[in-house]
């Protein structure tokens, strides 16, 4: 049974993703990443802090050596929060929205990933320290699918990423939206640089379903989990690592990621997805 994150919690964050991660904790959508504004992390859960623990992160030249785990007893479950250097300790009570610490950019992050709070849930009799084993997560919001033809103009850039103005968000601040699967639902995850993606908001069928972007098949969905095909994403003909797909409250637009992204503000871009 999935644990549902309430709408009023989700709307405290400008973006969320269940599948945009290469780590076991996100398998089958068993965790959610919540992206807040600012350097401090608001708690997505209420309850009593059970423990905090520093954990060694994969070594990356741009990242902190240690990440941190915060365990919170919500009453129904034990919540696991990651990527926050805690300002709380065991025995503290927290409410939704309380400051629980400062964001940590640890080696679990790819260089193009913004600061976020990782949230997963365990039953009380499960080991809360293991990376895998959390319960599936669901969201109490409808995510609007946005059709996309593969084109756009660069409106935001970083050293390893560029975001396009298309597809445009229909109602910034009012509801969540994401890139539409051509058949149904919204695609979530790193295409194709993470093995698995997600198909959110679509009815779960009995058999496999096609997952596609801008008219090109990119994978096959079983339930809400997508196995990506072996494809290459190109921007104006040049290969990039892939597309970061997520659900956004305030803006939309496809995000191209990777060391090979060489795009400037105002560039017109045509994205193609080619079979490898």
Image (cartoon, grey):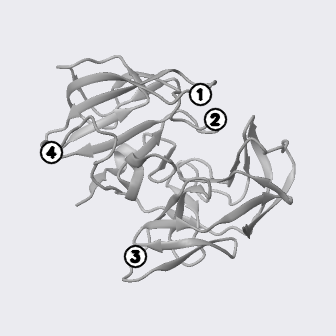
Which residue sits at x=64%, y=38%? 112
Q: Nearer the viewer, residue 162 or 51?
A: 51
Question: Where, by quadrant of the figure, is residue 124 drawn?
Answer: top left
Which residue sits at x=42%, y=40%? 12
The correct choice, above or below, for 66 with respect to 114 in the image is: above
Q: Nearer the viewer, residue 208 or 40?
A: 208
Q: Nearer the viewer, mark 4 or mark 1?
A: 1
Q: CA distance from mark 4 to mark 2?
A: 35 Å
State the SS at label 3.
Answer: loop
The residue where tag 4 is placed is: 76
State the SS at label 2.
Answer: loop
Q: CA distance from mark 1 to mark 3?
A: 39 Å
Q: Which mark is residue 60?
A: 1
Q: Nearer the viewer, residue 195 or 6?
A: 195
Sequence-wise, the earlier of marks 2 and 1 is: 1
The residue where tag 2 is placed is: 111
The correct choice, above or below, for 23 with respect to 220 in the image is: above
């Amino acid at each position: 049974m999935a644990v549902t994150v309430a709408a009023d919690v989700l709307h405290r964050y400008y973006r969320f993703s269940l599948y945009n991660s290469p780590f076991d904790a996100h398998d089958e959508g068993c965790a959610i990443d919540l992206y807040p504004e600012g350097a401090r992390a608001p708690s997505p859960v209420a309850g009593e802090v059970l423990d905090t623990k520093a954990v060694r992160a994969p070594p990356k030249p741009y990242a902190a050596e240690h990440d941190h785990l915060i365990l919170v007893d919500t009453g129904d479950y034990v919540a696991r929060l990651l990527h926050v250097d805690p300002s709380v300790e065991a025995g503290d009570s927290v409410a939704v929205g309380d400051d629980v610490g400062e964001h940590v950019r640890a080696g679990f992050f790819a260089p193009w990933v913004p600061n976020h709070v990782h949230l997963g849930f365990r039953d009380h009799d499960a080991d809360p320290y293991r990376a895998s084993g959390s319960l599936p997560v669901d969201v109490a919001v409808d995510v609007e699918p946005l059709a996309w033809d593969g084109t756009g103009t660069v409106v935001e850039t970083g050293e390893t990423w560029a975001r396009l103005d298309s597809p445009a968000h229909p109602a910034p601040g009012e509801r969540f939206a994401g890139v539409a699967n051509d058949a149904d639902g919204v695609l979530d995850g790193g295409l194709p640089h993470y093995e698995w993606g997600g198909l959110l908001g679509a009815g779960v069928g009995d058999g496999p379903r096609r997952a596609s972007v801008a008219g090109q098949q990119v994978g096959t969905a079983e339930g809400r989990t997508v196995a990506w095909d072996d494809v290459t994403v190109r921007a104006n003909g040049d290969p990039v690592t892939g597309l970061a797909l997520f659900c956004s409250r305030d803006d939309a637009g496809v995000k191209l990621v990777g060391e090979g992204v060489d795009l400037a503000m105002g560039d017109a871009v045509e994205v193609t997805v080619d079979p490898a």
